[in-house]
């Protein structure tokens, strides 16, 4: 009888220890998920602001260029056209500074967030000298770009789909997805899926 009681107590203790380990594992997982979501919010927020600022300057660059050609048709307005060209160069320089600022901010966030290298290529085509530009001086949008951030158990991705750019109020759709091991989970649900969830339709 005593042996049976001892066995039951040992089994109960083992079961309690197992439950404790499971709870600790789940708590650790939730803690990692929370940290991942905070990192996602910060990186997406910085990207959101970066795109908005670049597109506003693109609008200014494009219109300054058009004004230059228009004013060049009228000789008295040539000095104004030159001023327009100078303003365009200033806006291009501002964009390059914003690019540097954005990359530095991502670098700071990477100290606490596991931001994947693909995120650093930015949604625009860039080189070591700055942005790639069209004939007007406007930055070129990258065909495909994702924000990628890892935790110990998961990777969250944000896919950007530009609906309306080259505007003072650009519109972009954001699609979220979380991968856990070899499974894809729709954010924020934990049910298995390979689809992307739409979170926002504009900046």
Image (cartoon, rainbow, N blue to C red):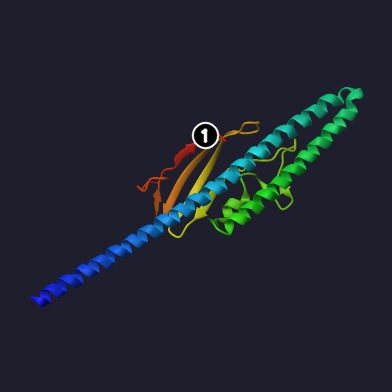
Can residue 146 be seen in the rendering of this structure? no
* Residue nearest the viewer, comparing 59 with 75: 59
Quadrant where the C terminus sits is top right
Residue displayed at 72% across by 53% down = 128
User: In the rendered view, does 180 fall on the left or right side of 160?
Assistant: left
Quadrant where the N terminus sits is bottom left
**Badge 1 local density, few (<14 within 10 Å), some, or many (20+)?**
some
* Residue nearest the viewer, comparing 36 with 5: 5
Tell me residue 23's x, y (percent): 33, 60
Tell me residue 127's x, y (percent): 70, 50
User: In the rendered view, does 30 fall on the left or right side of 172?
Assistant: left
Tell me residue 123's x, y (percent): 61, 44
Residue displayed at 76% across by 41% down = 92
- Secondary structure under badge 1? loop
Residue displayed at 81% across by 35% down = 87
The part of the image, by quadrant, that contains residue 170 is: top right
The part of the image, by quadrant, that contains residue 171 is: top right
Can residue 17 be seen in the rendering of this structure? yes
- Measured along the vertical axis of the image, is residue 78 above or below residue 158? above
User: In the rendered view, does 151 fall on the left or right side of 25?
Assistant: right
The part of the image, by quadrant, that contains residue 89 is: top right
User: In the rendered view, does 41 fall on the left or right side of 26?
Assistant: right
Residue indicated by mark 1:
201
- Measured along the vertical axis of the image, is residue 111 above or below residue 5? above
Q: Residue furthest bottom?
A: 3
Q: Residue furthest left?
A: 1
């Amino acid at each position: 009888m005593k042996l049976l009681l001892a066995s039951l107590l040992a089994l109960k203790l083992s079961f309690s220890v197992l439950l404790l380990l499971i709870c600790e594992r789940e708590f650790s997982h939730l803690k990692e998920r929370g940290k991942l979501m905070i990192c996602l919010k910060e990186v997406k927020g910085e990207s959101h602001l970066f795109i908005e600022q670049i597109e506003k300057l693109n609008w200014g660059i494009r219109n300054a260029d058009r004004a230059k050609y228009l004013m060049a048709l009228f000789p008295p307005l040539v000095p104004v056209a030159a001023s327009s060209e100078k303003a365009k160069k200033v806006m291009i320089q501002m964009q390059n500074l914003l690019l540097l600022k954005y990359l530095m901010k991502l670098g700071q966030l990477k100290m606490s967030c596991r931001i994947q290298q693909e995120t650093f290529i930015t949604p625009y085509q860039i080189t070591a000298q700055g942005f790639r530009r069209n004939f007007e001086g406007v930055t070129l949008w990258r065909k495909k770009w994702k924000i990628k951030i890892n935790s110990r158990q998961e990777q969250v991705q944000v896919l950007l789909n530009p609906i309306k750019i080259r505007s003072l109020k650009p519109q972009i759709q954001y699609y979220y997805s979380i991968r856990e091991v070899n499974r894809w989970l729709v954010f924020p649900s934990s049910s298995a899926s390979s689809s992307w969830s739409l979170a926002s339709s504009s900046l």
